[in-house]
Structures are given as C-alpha cells and as structure tokens.
Image: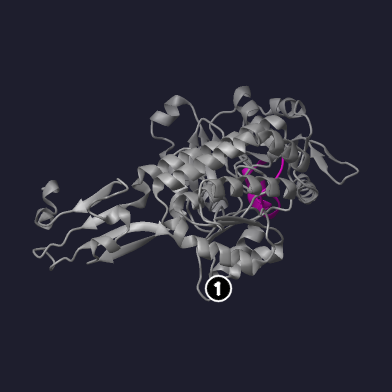
Amino acid sequence: MTENQNIEEVAAAAAAAARPFARTSPRARAAALVAVADALDAAAGELIPIGMRETGLAQARLTGELRRTSWQLRLFADTIVDGGYLDARIDLADPEYVIGPRPDVRRMLEPVGPVLNFAASNFPFAFSVAGGDSAAALAAGCPVVVKAHSGHPELSRATAAVVIGALEGAGMPKGTFQLISGQENGVALLKDERIRAGAFTGSTHVGRMLADIAASRPVPIPFYGELGSVNPVYATYADAALLDGFVASVAGSAGQLCTKPGFLFVPADADLSSIGGAASAVAEHRLLNPGIGRAFTQRRGDVLGAEGVDVLSQGEVRVDDDGQTFATPTVVAVDVDTLLADREALLEESFGPLSVVVRYKDRDALPALHADLFPGNLTSTVHAREAELEDGSLSELVDALAETSGRVLFGGWPTGVSVTPAMQHGGPYPATTSDGTSVGTAAITRFLRGVAYQGAPQDLLPAPLQDANPWGVPQSISRAGNSTSWGASVR
C-alpha cells in the first residue's frame, strides 16, 4: 500500500509498529536502510522521468539528488551500526560517592515514536518522501508517515511504494512507513496523540502554523520546521570571479533552494558591471509549480518597484499555457541606507532566481548591521582576502554570523549542502522552529529522547545498557570510586 487516506488506520498502524521497530537491532535496521537505498537506485529509470515531468527540474539535477538520497540512507546505516548516537552512559553503583551513595543508573537515547514528515517541494527526492527527515527518523527507530507534497504527487506515490516494499522485504514491521496526502489529513494527523514528533520544510507561514498546532496539543510534541532563510554573503572585494560565482549560486535550480544567497554585501566602490552579462547568459528555467511561480512574480515586482533600487539584471518571467512560470535571474543593487529604509519590501525571502547586492561603505559596521537585519538564517558567508582572514580584523563579523546562523562559510557559496557527519542545516528562528539539523548524521538526534534506568535487572535493560553489551555499542562507564578525583586534572 502506498497511500492510505484513513487517518485513524494510519495512526494506528504507526503506533503498532513503534515498539517492534524500536527494538530492531542496529544491524537489522541498517540492512533495511541499505535495502531502501538499493531499491531507490534500481528504480531511478522510473522515478526520474516522473520527477522531471512534475517539477520541471532537469535530469542531471534529479539524478544527482536521487544519488544523494540513497547514499544518505547508507550513511545513516553506518551511523546506527556504530551505535555512538545512542549516547549510552552507565553509572555503576557507588556507596562512597562524594555527594551521597549513588545507585546504578544507566541512560541512553531511545526513539520518540511515530514521526509525521511534511515533504518539501523543491527537493522531490532529498527533502521529500525518502529524504533527510524520513531517513533520520527511520534510522532512529521511529515509524514515519509522510504527508506528500502536492507539487509532485505521482512521484511521491511511486517513491513511497519503493520504500515500503524495501522495508517490508527487509523484515521491518508493517506500518513502519506510510504516505498520506492533503492538507486536512496532514493537520489531522499532526493533532493525533499517537504522532510524537513532526518535521517540515517549506514556507514560513505554513511552517509556523504547523508548529503552533504541534505546540498547542494537549500534550505538545517537538516540531522541527525549516522555514525561510536569505543567507547573506559578505565580501571585502568583488572581482569578476566572485560575481560569476554569486550569479551561478543565485541561478542554480532557478533559485529555488533554501540556501540561495539572497543578499551579497560588497564595498561601495565595487564594479558590478559583469553581473548583467553573467545573468543574461543563464537560460530560462521552469519554476516548480504554478503557485511558486505566482509568488515569485509578485515578490519580484515588489523588489523591482522598491524605491532606490538599481537594476543590474532585469531578468524575465514567462507563463505558458499550462500556467507554469519560466524565469531568468533578476539581480538588483541598493546601498545600506536604502535597504534599511525599505526593509519591508527588500528583506523578505525571494524564492526563485532573485537576489539583492548591497553596497556598504563601512566594513566595521557590518556586524551590527547583520544582527539587526538577519536574526536567523541557515547560512552566512564570508569572502575575504587571505590576509584579512588571518589578521583577526573579521573576528567580530564572524562572531555575529555564528550567533545567527547554522553554518558559516568562508570562500564558498551556500548552495550545494553536502551530507556529512559534521553538517549543520538549521539555524535560529525564523530559519527553523527548533534549532537542529535536517542534514547529516546529527539529524538523528531530533527523533530520540533520553531514558534512564535505575537499579534495573540486567534482563530488563535495553541491550545497549547491559553489561554484556550484545549490540557492541560504545558505552561511557563511570566506575565506583571515580568521584574522589574530580577536579584533579586542573590542579
């Protein structure tokens, strides 16, 4: 079954699968994730053409995205076999504990239970049905219900069928993975007491609405929403190579990336003449769906109509007979005073191929300006000469970026998020509702909670906390007598 619109049955199946799935051994669950990855790769010839037809994204882009999706599952497989993510801690009983007798206490991270994942539109593989949130929740041992995005319904059903078939073939419980569609069904399931966490990638308006629903339940649940980000870039110079890289980052996938650089700050005397030529060389690209096309057209009009805007690349917007929007990059320039004076028109995220270049006169004013304008973003970026990076003159700016961003880049562009153990794809609000990461192996921690067992018999302890450690996971053990040496290492 790839889709079930009976929400009661969906919630019941997820709840019934929760405990059996949580108790699967790391190797069994890892094998299931690899089976899903293999099945997705094998189905590429079927899935990619559907994705191209529904989203307008190119074959090369979708091929790379599907590869990222399958290899992400394999990375999580290795993560759960290693077992370090469980953070297993064992405090052995110690009658001589310095602050009073200590009982035997053992703690680990355990799955939260069924997770509802609202799929994204702009990554029909990597942030959709089998994408990062689903992969992390499955790796954690949580059943997943995906609310399909209306922008690619056929691809969602086809992908879900592949995932469900692979999981069931690997022996995972029925109900471990399910698909629903429709806003009403998504909201109804988010309110269901059997759902224990939510995940979302999309607009600020919808994400905040869902986050408020999750928080207002009789028993609130964690909700990990990735909302909006303008990803400012600060450059101390602006040569042709830097500006070409900027345009390429803005234009990639028609600017429909959550890490697209929405603002580029450059010195006031920078020569920006090459931007127009670089932007005009970009072929038109279809936006994901008519709704996004309409929103981009409105947003573009607001920016172009703002007072004091200097148009570097007008760009074009075309709507075909099917209502699909095609666009080329629009780039404008303003000075800092104009940006501050017309912030309501200029600061909102433009989801599409549009960006704003900001000319600044005082580099030392950038940290305070950033803190004022950009309270929460997925990324912030610095482009500077090597000497400037080494002399400490940018330390205050870097500190300001780190306080307001999930990822701080040096000399690169924020688009092209790699799936790695150290990746952070999240940031302070309004970038996300709950600071965390939706990319990389640390994403698994969102769907786990700490449980401690005190004085428990060995047979009733979870396998990672038993003395025999049958799963062979890392255990941090505090032995009796250790407390008397606290603080000795710093004397």
Coordinates of residue 36 in the picture (x, y in percent): 56, 42
Nearer to the camera, 121 or 33: 33
**In the shown orientation, is residue 51 left or right of residue 324?**
left
User: Quadrant of the image for the N terminus?
Assistant: bottom right
**In the shown orientation, is residue 424 left or right of residue 462?**
right
Nearer to the camera, 450 or 70: 70
Q: How many marks?
A: 1
Coordinates of residue 151 in the picture (x, y in percent): 74, 49
**In the shown orientation, is residue 323 left or right of residue 46?**
right
Nearer to the camera, 256 or 264: 256
Q: Which residue is mark 1?
A: 217
The answer to which image quadrant residue 486 occupies is bottom left
Coordinates of residue 489 in the picture (x, y in percent): 13, 47
Amino acid type at image mark 1? Arg
Location of residue 12 with respect to 297 vertically, above or below: below
**In the shown orientation, is residue 479 left or right of residue 333?**
left
Residue at 72% x, 61% y: name it: 182
The residues colored magenta run: 332-353
Location of residue 297 with respect to 360 vertically, above or below: below
Residue at 22% x, 53% y: name it: 467
Coordinates of residue 340 in the picture (x, y in percent): 63, 50
Local secondary structure at mark 1: loop
- Does residue 308 appear in the picture of this structure? yes
The answer to which image quadrant residue 308 occupies is top right
Category of crowding for the residue at label 1, using alpha-carbon neighbours closer than 10 angstroms: few (below 14), some (14–19), many (at least 20): few
Specify whether residue 337 is painted magenta.
yes
Location of residue 414 with respect to 159 vertically, above or below: above
